[in-house]
Image (cartoon, rainbow, N blue to C red):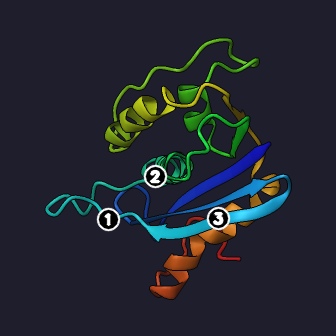
Amino acid sequence: MIEAYFDGCCEPVNPGGIASYGVVILREGKRIWEASEIFMPTPGREKETSNNVAEYSGFEAILRYLLKENLNQEQIVLFGDSKLVICQMFVTAEYGKRWKIKSGHYVPVARRCQQLLLKFPRLTGKWIPREENSVADELSKAQLKKAGVRFRIQPEG
């Protein structure tokens, strides 16, 4: 069983700030991979960032890692505190059907994730409260802290 956690943030303003994500993957309870990255927008579109872009970028990083490692046939549960990502990518018990992808800077990343998900027959998603996502949350802020970004929206620690 593989469990993966993702989170993202955008500071010091959202949208338009510096977006970053954090992810961690566990296999049988042992950490096998983690990443903390700043989202790099297309040149000329540097202000097209948001917390949703960051969340989806983390989600995409997990899917790409699992594919690269040929783990896409495994039983996988993806956890995230972004209700938008979870409800757009998965049918949930709470809402019964996927939310529509409407508009926003996140749409291209969301569409890539939809395509990648087709390669995962045994992957499910589950929304969790922020308090249960502390490792990915900490990782999502790590690169921003290193870059000296001032936190104004989310608590830094």
Q: How many residues crowd around disc 2 within 10 Å: few (fewer than 14), some, or many (20 or more)?
A: many
Q: Report the Cα–Cα distance between label 2 and label 3.
A: 16 Å
Q: Which residue is mark 1?
A: 40
Q: Earlier in the sequence, mark 2 or mark 1?
A: 1
Q: Residue furthest front?
A: 70
| Residue 25 x/y as whole percent | 69, 56
Q: Report the Cα–Cα distance between label 3 and label 1.
A: 21 Å
Q: Is label 2 in a helix, a strand or a loop?
A: helix
| Residue 103 x/y as whole percent | 34, 31
Is label 3 or label 1 in front?
A: 3
Task: Verify CB contact (< 8 Å) between mark 2 and mark 1.
Answer: no
Q: Earlier in the sequence, mark 2 or mark 3?
A: 3
Hey, what amino acid is under mark 1? Answer: Met
Q: Which residue is mark 3?
A: 33
Q: In front: 152, or 42?
A: 42
Q: Is label 3 in a helix, a strand or a loop?
A: strand
| Residue 117 x/y as whole percent | 51, 31
Could you tell whether 122 is left or right of 88 in the image?
A: right
Q: Earlier in the sequence, mark 3 or mark 1?
A: 3
Asked if residue 71 is positioned above or below residue 141 in the image, the reply reads above
The part of the image, by quadrant, that contains residue 80 is top right
